[in-house]
Image (tube, coloured by chain):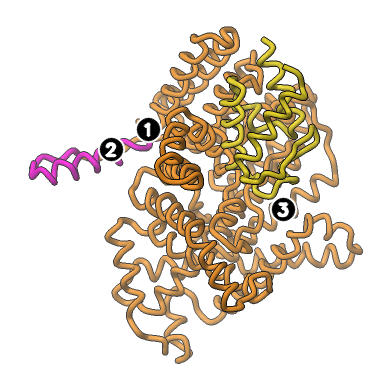
Chain colours: A yellow, B orange
Amino acid sequence: MSKEEIYERLNKVFQDIFDDESITVNENTTSDDIEDWDSLEHINLVVAVEQEFGMKFNMNEVTTMKNVGEMVDIILSRISK
Amino acid sequence: MLLTSLSFLAFAIITVLLYFILPKKCQWLVLLIASLVFLFYKNLSIGTIIQALAVLLSSYVLGRQIEKNKETKKAKRYLIIGIAIILGILAYLKYSNLFIITVNHILDLFKVSYQFKQVQRVSLIGISYYSLIMISYLVDIYRGTCKSEKNILKLALFMSYFPILNSGPFIRYENMKDELYKKHKFSYDRLCSGLVRILWGLFKILVISQRLGMYVDTVYANLATYNGFYTVIAILFFPMQLYTNFSGSIDIIMGISEILGIKLPENFTTPFFSTSMTEFWRHWHITLGAWLKEYIFYPLLKSTIMQKLNTFCKNKFSKKIGKKIPMFLSMFIMWVCIGVWHGGAYTYIIGSGIIQFIFIFLEDLLGPIVSKINKKIGIKEDVFSYKLYKTIRTYLLFSISMIFFRATSIKNAIKIFLSIFFYNPWILFDNNSIYKAGLDLLDFRVLILSLIVLFIVEKLSRTGSVREKLFKQNIVFRWGIIYALIFGIVIFGCYGVGYDPAEFIYRGF
């Protein structure tokens, strides 16, 4: 799967979780850029991403990833295994 | 060893001197020996040695094994065994009576006349802290966020680092390993800064907390005599007593750690300025909250069972409810854990657990509705007066919850609460009555003045370190403030009859 495809699918997950069709994420997007993205929504988001890509983040990654770029890197490393 | 006792003062001075006089490669060993002295002070027995060694050895061996068997089923098994051993020891030493009381209640319900006797068990100081710290050590190795420690003595220092044994903060191995074991140079600036923090802690405990305690203790012990407004004042005093006591002891140990060159995480950031209970708990006992979030709340929320509940509620009700129900269920479990952690009594489970959850739940539920009403009737929420109202409301809510925390039993808590409803406002105005409940007129004046000082310092600390601001001032002002603090503690400190050092409310946990 290419990075572009991942971003495309990720956009849909974000739009669904935050109920906002206008959201498009890029590698620099952080929780500061999306109003409702607090620590609780973060967990919901992570779970939704896991379901979308059929992979798992470990708890360390959940709490330390800093932006969407890092999230995509983890997804890429998992699904390419 | 109480932090305000002369024996602790001697202990701290000797530790700091040896730490900087002996060769630097011995520094961590000095800390280890000091920590063991602190841990076993007046508590050295075969039993206490076994309980500490069991936690240390199991964490050491299982930590190594988890790392060796990474990403296998074995690692998970070792992790579970480790957590079970640590929690088992903690429960045996601290929660046996809670279990016995519960069983007795159940027997009572079924009209069985047999009752189990409560037991007395000696646990080491800081057991509630080092147990959770060692669990986080094992979990972090399992998650791959930290490497296991090869030197068991170094791990022993991490487990027993004496400044954190009295009342936290919770530390994590990954953040502490370099701090604890590396060589630290002596620094005059750090010494001054640390000492000022220690003085500030002593001021909070001896001048404010002890004084508030004299009133609170008198009223709570004689509810028949002191009711109505006496009780209201005691209920309002207690959170401040608890805060100055708890954060004061944190200031003392942080000051010592700073002198040693070891940075610890902050545990309080001016909680009483919070405008909601949710915000309050982000500023009160921060490291406990962080621990629970990291090791209980998030894993729970992310667990398959909660996600299934999420999907079920989403299909049954709505997307929003689907998210909220698992969240609040996980939150409820977390708050019960906080309550249980505070001690083996139902008063703690209710006062520092369930009531806090109810407040936070109601805030989330009613907050949006109140905001809508406010908008409709034109009440502005982003103005000073509204924020002040919310700040006062938060303090009041916390005060009410703390009735349970302070009471000796649930019955006692209800009695305290009911004694509010005795109408005697004249005690505030007849010039004499109020001064008969443990604090005289002079004490009240000192108290009000010191609370103003506390307020100013807390307000200043919201825009950066007060000590840094102080050290930037001219020498006369700087030393004037330091001397005022020293004399304030010496003259107005409450030392009790025959110097009975201040007891620490949070020490028992």
Q: Position of residue B474 (x, y in %)?
A: 91, 64
Q: Secondary structure at mark 3?
A: helix
**Residue B111 vs residue A17: left or right?**
left
Q: Secondary structure at mark 2?
A: helix
2 or 3: tag closer to the N-terminus: 2
Q: At 64% across and 13% down in the image, what residue appears?
A: B150
A42 or B96: nearer the eye? A42
Which residue is denoted by mark 1 in the rendering? B91
Q: Amino acid at mark 1?
A: Ala
Magenta includes B95? yes
**Residue B347 vs residue A33: left or right?**
left
Mark 3 packing: few (<14 Cα in 10 Å), some, or many (20+)? many
**Residue B111 vs residue A36: left or right?**
left
Q: Position of residue B3 (x, y in %)?
A: 58, 48
Question: Range of the magenta residues?
Answer: B94-116
Discs 1 and 3 lie in a common subunit: yes
Question: Compared with residue B421, is residue B401 higher up or lower down, i.e. above or below?
Answer: above
Task: In the displayed orientation, state which residue is furthest to the right.
Answer: B474
Which residue is denoted by mark 2 in the rendering? B99
In this view, the mark in front (2 or 3)? 2
Question: Is the residue under label 3 in contact with that under label 1 (CB below 8 Å)?
Answer: no
Question: Is the residue under label 2 in contact with that under label 1 (CB below 8 Å)?
Answer: yes
Q: Position of residue B388 (x, y in %)?
A: 62, 72
Q: Chain of mark 3?
A: B
Question: Compared with residue B320, is residue B17 higher up or lower down, i.e. above or below?
Answer: above
Mark pair 1, 3: CA separation:
35 Å
Task: In the displayed orientation, state which residue is furthest to the bottom.
Answer: B430
1 or 3: tag closer to the N-terminus: 1
Q: Chain of mark 1?
A: B
| Prevailing secondary structure class for the magenta stretch in the rendered image | helix
